[in-house]
Structures are given as structure tokens and as C-alpha cells.
Image: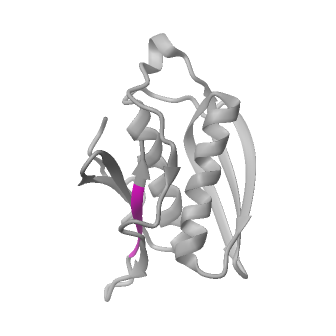
Amino acid sequence: MNGSAPATRGTARWEHFPHDADVGVRGFGATPEEAFAQAAMALTAIVTDAEVAPATAVEVSCRAPDLELLFVAWLNAVIYEMAVRKMLFARFAVTIADGRLAGTLRGEPIDVARHAPACEPKGATYTALKVAQDAGGLWSAACIVDV
């Protein structure tokens, strides 16, 4: 399980943070959408260190009354798609408007031999939930994921 990823575009990056038996995920970006996408990358990195091919697109949508609740709904939508489709995802596109999120997940079916899954995320929680913009304009989105 990786601990963090270097910025690939400007300030976009993700990291894990410790929490008892579970795992914290945090995404950073110039926009909430970018921070949400980076947090989803951290979610995949909980499962595997292997490269995941962005071969197949899956569309998801969710809505919530505020960004923090929308973030949990987003991660849970990704976790749901991982579980029911038996897939891992490598790329994430997110659009947020009026309390609604539209996302595209790009990934491939799990190959146990190649991906060597370390664990299965069960759900994003409200523990350590925070979506905020810092004084420098950088957005972050974080919460604990039950594994």
C-alpha cells in the first residue's frame, strides 16, 4: 500500500493517514473536483500497489446537501463499483454542480495474480471527514475508510 503520490499536475496529489485499524484517505487539488479525484486514487492504492489500466469507463453520480457529505457519497460510489464490478480504477474525472456529482471511473477487472489485492475497502465514514480550502487556495478532501 503506497503512502502518498507526488503531484502530477500542479498541486494534485493524495496521501494515506493513520487511523487505528482503518485507513485515512486524503486528496489535494486546485479544485474540490481534483481533490475528490485524488482521494479516489488513494482509495485504489489501499487495495493495490500494481498499475491499473484505465481500459473501461464506468459512470457514477451522487448528490448531497454539502461538499463533505458529497465526498463520502463519492467514495462510497467508487467502493460500490469496485465491489459489484470486481474492478479497480486508475483514473477519475469529477464534475460537481448544485450538490450533484457526476464522475467517470476508468479501470480494469481485478487480476488477483497481478494486482495482489491487500484488502477490500468496505465504506467511507464520517470519521475525520473534512473538505476545505486552505489560505493558499489548495483544496483537500479527507475521511477514514473502513477496510
Q: Nearer the viewer, residue 31 or 1?
A: 1
Can you say whether 132 is above or below 41 in the image? below
Horizontal and vertical percent for residue 4?
29, 48
* Residue 17 located within the stretch drawn in magenta: no
Horizontal side, residue 20 vs residue 96: left or right: left
Q: Quadrant of the C terminus?
A: top left
Q: Quadrant of the N terminus?
A: top left
Residue 108, quarter of picture: top right
Horizontal and vertical percent for residue 74?
61, 59
Q: Residue at x 52, y 50 (%)?
A: 123
Horizontal and vertical percent for residue 80?
64, 44
Q: Magenta stretch?
A: 139-144
Q: Residue at x 69, y 57 (%)?
A: 103
Residue furthest front as drawn: 21
Q: Residue at x 45, y 56 (%)?
A: 39
Can you say whether 93 is above or below 147 in the image? below
Q: Nearer the viewer, residue 35 or 82?
A: 82
Horizontal side, residue 29 vs residue 134: left or right: right
Horizontal side, residue 136 vs residue 73: left or right: left
Residue furthest top as drawn: 113
Secondary structure character of the magenta stretch overall: strand
Residue 10, quarter of picture: bottom left
